[in-house]
Every structure is written in structure tokens, then in C-alpha cells.
Image: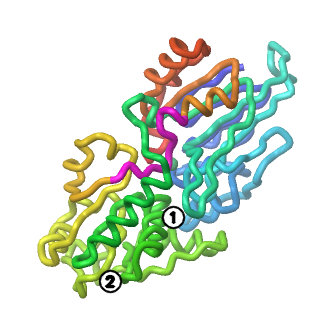
Amino acid sequence: MTVRREDGVHIEAGQTYVADASSAVGDVNLVSHAHADHTFRTAPDTVVCSAETAALVEARTGATLPEYREGTDEVTLYPAGHVVGSRAALVEADGAGDPAGEARRYLYTGDFSVRDRLYLDGFEPVEADVLVMETTYGDPRYRFPPERELQGEIRDWLADNDERPLVLFGYALGRAQKLQWLAREATDRPLLVHESIRTVNDAIESATGLDFPAETLPAGDDPSLADGAPDLAGDEILVLPTHHSRSDWVEEVAERYDALKAGFSGWAVEESFRYRGGYDATFPFSDHCDFDELVDVVEAVDPEVVYTHHGFAAEFADYLTTHHGYDARPLLGDQTRLDQF
Ligand SMILES: [Zn+2]
């Protein structure tokens, strides 16, 4: 068996299983979640993913996915707790076609979080012989506060700053919906979202029983609002994609209405995150595991071999080997494909 990373993660185990790649070259092609929104430039016949991921990929790219299946005889999907529709995949290879002839269980986590968050259940580890895991925050500096405490702080901040507009930044799929949810819990102020977030809201609403009642920001002729800031009454909460945090129209809103900007990410553990985004407040509110949670997952899966990728892949593999005696290896390779979120 081999596990390698080039375009996506490739697992050779009798058949070739390819996860989160742009080219569908596997016998079985997996999509863990809808963040990798350039998924499949060449469309395979069949994709293994959740129904929600299929709906979200279609909504975000406008592309019609080929057929999708929520599993095969060898592949079982498990909720990964990262964003709506995200799944980890357990591949149970019977050893036929493998030179060693050994039956093995491979667990590919995709992006994942073990925390139950608002409307999302956290990932529950399953045992496997080989664990392939993302290690975005695989460094001991990245430890997040308990979820209940963190959400309480965010709700308090939203409720306390009630005299001016608040502009909240998060990825259009994932953080943006959770911020809307927290804002609804904390206040009854008008909620406005960027249209790219509205697109995701709509797709989630039609694929699940969830509801995200927010107005869409008036975009005028220019969907990016580059032409200027929208007129506000002053009590609105805006939820915008992260990449707008430094845009001119946001600066104009901040200046004209004395608005506060807040950023939400695991990177908020670092002080530099605040300056990079020009935020007034930051919260380490994440859709990934923190360092301790990553270690806990490895212990619960109890694998013979661990492959790490993304973020602190080499550091985390080294930590597992040195402190826990695991056979752990970073999957170095094309660092640009797996999504950045
Ligand atoms: Zn992701």
C-alpha cells in the first residue's frame, strides 16, 4: 500500500482512492467537503461525497456534478464536523490486489473538528490501521478555549457593542453561517450578508433543515460593492467573506458609521492575525481541531501509521513520533491543492 500526496491524497490499496483532487484519476474519487471549490476540472463518472457537499459544490461553482454516492462497499463516510456536508472516509481494503495481501482500514479525515458547534456535530473517531489527517493547527501554540466559553465571549461582544454597525468576517461556507447563528442568538439586530454568503445559505437551506434568515447586502451594479459602501441605518450586523476585510468599501463603512470589524479564525491565537485583517476584535473560532484535539484523535483512532498533511504537517508528525512513539510521516507534495480553509 502507498499513501501519497500530489494532486489530492492518493491511497493505493488494491484500488486507487483519490481524495480532494482536481483530476479524477482514481478508481474511486472522494470529495470530503465543498471548500475545494475547483474540485474536479475533469469530471469523473462518480464521486463519493455527501448529498450536502454535492449540493454546495453545484451551488458555488454552477457546475453540475456527475453522479454522487454516499459510500461504496469499501468506503464509509462519517461526519467530519468541519462544515455542513463535510465527511471523513473510512476505506476498508480487503487486501486483494495489494502485493502484501493484507486487509487494512484507512481513515482519511479531510478537514475536521471534534467540537459540537451550534448546528454541527463534531467528528467522532473510528479505529483504523492507517490514519491520513489534516494538521492545520498541529503545533502546540494552537490551543483554543472551550467551545462554550468561546461562543459566550462572541455573543457578549455582539450584545455589548450595540451602538454601531458590526462587520464580521468568516469564510463564506462554514464560519459565515455560524456567525449568523451566533448573531441571531445574541441580538435581534438586522443581519446583512454578502451575496456569496447568501448563495451558500440558500444551498444549505435547501439541502438541510437549517434556516439562515438574513438580508442580502444591496450590491447595485457591482456585486463586490467596489463602487462604494451601502447605506446603513447604523444598527446592522454585516457578515462578509474574509477576503473583504481590507477592501475599500469596508474601510468606508467602518469610517462613515464608526463600525467595528471582527475576525474569526484559529489563527486568531496569533496577535498578527488582528493586524493582517485590520480587525478591532478577534476570536479563535475555528472549524478545525486545535493541537490537543489532533493528538486525542490519533490516540482514539489508534493507527499503525499516521500520515499528516497541511499546516504543521512535519512538526506534528515529529511530535507524534517523539512523544507518542507513532510511525508518523508528513505527506509533503503539492501544498496548493487541498483547500486553504
Ligand atoms: Zn475546509
Residue 157 drawn above or below residue 76: below
Residue at the location (53% across, 30% down)? 6
Image position, residue 240 (x, y; %): 35, 67
Residue at the location (57% across, 18% down)? 328
Residue 241 drawn above or below residue 146: below
* Label 2: which secondary element: loop
Q: Is residue 145 left or right of residue 65?
A: left
Residue 18 drawn above or below residue 191: above
Image position, residue 180 (x, y; %): 44, 70
Structural crowding at the residue carrying mark 2, measured as other residues with C-alpha within 10 Å and reported as few (<14), some (14–19) or many (≥20): some
Quarter-of-image position of residue 13 = top right
| Residue on which the image places disc 1 | 60
As drawn, the label of residue 218 is 2
Q: Which residues are magenta?
A: 283-293
As drawn, the label of residue 40 is none
Q: Are marks 1 and 2 in contact (CB under 8 Å)?
A: no
Image position, residue 300 (x, y; %): 68, 31
**The N terminus lies in quadrant:** top right
Q: Which residue is nearer to you in this view: 224 or 301?
A: 301
Image position, residue 163 (x, y; %): 23, 78
Secondary structure mostly seen in magenta is loop
Q: Which residue is nearer to you in this view: 84 or 265?
A: 265
Residue at the location (19% across, 77% down)? 228
Q: Earlier in the sequence, mark 1 or mark 2?
A: 1
Given the image, on which type of amino acid does mark 2 rest? Pro
- Distance from disc 1 to disc 2, alpha carbons, whole Å, reads 20 Å
Given the image, on which type of amino acid does mark 1 rest? Arg
Q: Which residue is nearer to you in this view: 300 or 94?
A: 300
Structural crowding at the residue carrying mark 1, measured as other residues with C-alpha within 10 Å and reported as few (<14), some (14–19) or many (≥20): some
